Image: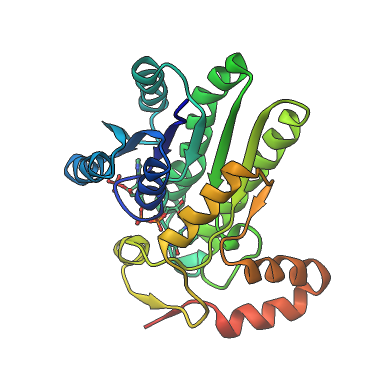
Amino acid sequence: MERVVAITGASAGIGRATALRLARDGAAIAICARREDKLKVVAGEIEQAGGRALPIVADVTSATDMARFVERTVSLYGRLDVVMCNAGYGLYGAIDTIAADQMHDVMNVNYFGTYHLLHAALPVLRKQNAGHIFVISSIVGQRGIPYMGAYSATKFAQVGLAECVRAELRDTPIKLSIVYPISTDTEFFKVMTEHSGFATRASGPRQSPDDVAQAIAAALERPVPEIYPQRIAKGLAVLNAIAPGFTDKLVKRWGRKPI
Ligand SMILES: NC(=O)c1ccc[n+]([C@@H]2O[C@H](COP(=O)([O-])OP(=O)(O)OC[C@H]3O[C@@H](n4cnc5c(N)ncnc54)[C@H](OP(=O)(O)O)[C@@H]3O)[C@@H](O)[C@H]2O)c1
């Protein structure tokens, strides 16, 4: 039986790459985002790869949109196996330069978007007594880096929620994996520049969205609680637990900086 997968923020980047990857693996895909034209292109790519696609224009900040996304997916495909809370964007700047409405907006998309989708999808998964949830956090949801405080806070918030839900679901067949990507070559940095008002650069390692999609596809076959698509990144979380002061020095040196 084909897997039914629902992904938010699939008009670009990690969401698009994962949609295409899982479609090639035989899944039926529902994708959502705000830009209808981009979403239609991705739906066409999924169909070209031999998959089935349901593109739905939706905003993750809307509880109604997320309920509709889940309802339409289940009504077309008959079930829901994989839920990926992915839509999100970045914001750069010292916290005293971030306006309250900027902070609210990024929390609304990154954290509340995750909450709204989980709220809509969990009853379906519970009824089926099956399913796999992926919450796309970030390595900065494990360890903050300078001037990414507003964004990092949203990524920690997702992790707090996801860890609680994962523990609640223990002893059930429903799985939850938290994904911790490092810098990934997507539209993310262009969008972050638009929101922040200036461009930035990082000097650390990078990965492709296909690397993240590959790690998610592997975890679907062998569920794990946490996914570090760039494995060495887990070292930062471990180092921070042992030596947070030393880690401050490290992230200050290697963290993102204005161009
Ligand atoms: N790229 C990185 O370096 C990196 C690293 C760690 C974690 N992440 C996380 O990975 C996730 C995906 O990011 P990405 O790198 O793939 O970025 P991206 O290429 O900019 O893609 C972001 C996706 O989210 C969608 N989106 C944004 N706001 C939305 C909203 N309000 N409602 C619905 N969809 C919305 C965008 O589509 P529309 O504009 O069409 O709505 C787009 O499809 C994010 O949660 C990000 O925080 C990224």
The x, y position of residue 20, in whole percent, is: 35, 47
The x, y position of residue 23, in whole percent, is: 37, 41
Residue 57 is drawn in which quadrant? top left
Q: Is residue 181 visible?
A: yes
Residue 163 is drawn in which quadrant? top right
In this picture, residue 174 sits left or right of residue 152? right
Q: Name the residue at 29% across, 47% down.
A: 11
For the C terminus, the quadrant is bottom left
Name of the residue lying farthest toward the right:
242
Q: Is residue 154 visible?
A: no
Q: How many marks?
A: 0
In the foreground, 207 or 259: 207
The x, y position of residue 177, in whole percent, is: 62, 44
Name of the residue lying farthest toward the left:
37
Residue 234 is drawn in which quadrant? bottom right
Tell me if residue 244 comes above or below residue 5 in the rendering: below
Here the colouring is: rainbow
In the foreground, 143 or 80: 80
Tell me if residue 9 comes above or below residue 3 in the rendering: below
Q: Name the residue at 65% across, 45% down.
A: 222
The x, y position of residue 198, in whole percent, is: 32, 73
Tell me if residue 164 comes above or below residue 73 in the rendering: below
Q: Name the residue at 50% across, 70% down.
A: 94
Q: Name the residue at 39% across, 76% down.
A: 200
In the foreground, 252 or 227: 227
